[in-house]
Amino acid sequence: QKEVEQNSGPLSVPEGAIASLNCTYSDRGSQSFFWYRQYSGKSPELIMSIYSNGDKEDGRFTAQLNKASQYVSLLIRDSQPSDSATYLCAPSLYGNKLVFGAGTILRVKS
Amino acid sequence: DTEVTQTPKHLVMGMTNKKSLKCEQHMGHRAMYWYKQKAKKPPELMFVYSYEKLSINESVPSRFSPECPNSSLLNLHLHALQPEDSALYLCASSQVGGQGGYEQYFGPGTRLTVT
């Protein structure tokens, strides 16, 4: 079993729709969870962090965490073509060590 | 604009060369990281420095040698690399402390090609 699992996609959504990205993790010791966006040929960009169960909203982005289910998700409202990228889920296993999922490719069609 | 800078942006080196990658952060962070990323794969952690001391080495071959001269600078010295070492090398930084882990901020990366 992989430590962090994401659907590789591509996930295709029309412009203006909600994109839902999911991630499961295996280590129950994970306490911090991060979502990164990576455009082709660029470095990862932090877009959301979440530390406790529930929802966290920042602009068009909402992160959801359920530690009991070992599940974290990212919702992108009013999706734009500029949101087309690979989204990486990264729980923090201990200390400052991140383990990245393989990423989900998102394509927003105009 | 990123507050983590990396030089050079691109590097081509032969298998007998010695080169260095440089990273600098201006965020006041005390943890710095080197990651390696191959095409269509997620970043893989190589090294972690915390308070200028090496705290994690993910069993990286000795042809990669990290150095942290001060809290703002991180180097990766390269020697006798193999073509399969060609990748995007990413530097990141974060705060230190607690068990939960802090947000890591990445530099733009160095695209390394080994010929």
Image: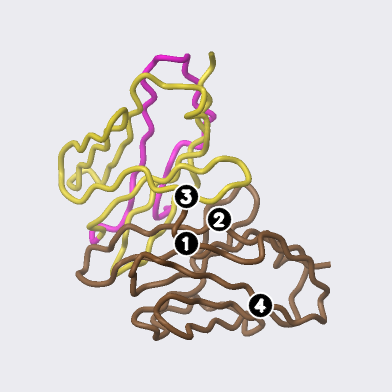
Chain colours: A yellow, B brown
Nearer the N terminus, badge 2 or badge 3? 3
Nearer the N terminus, badge 2 or badge 1? 1
For residue B20, the mark is 4
Q: Which residue is mark 1?
A: B4
Q: Position of residue B62 (x, y in %)?
A: 62, 85
- Quarter of the image holding residue B55? bottom left
In the rendered image, residues at marks 1 and 3 fall on the same chain: yes
Q: Are marks 1 and 3 in contact (CB under 8 Å)?
A: no
At x 45% / y 47%, what residue is drawn? A45
Residue A25 part of the magenta segment: yes
Label 2 and label 3: CA atoms lie apart by 10 Å
Indicate the secondary structure of the residue bearing disc 1.
strand
At x 29% / y 51%, what residue is drawn? A33
Q: Which residue is mark 3?
A: B1
For residue B108, the mark is 2
- Quarter of the image holding residue B8? bottom right
Q: Position of residue A59 (x, y in %)?
A: 28, 30
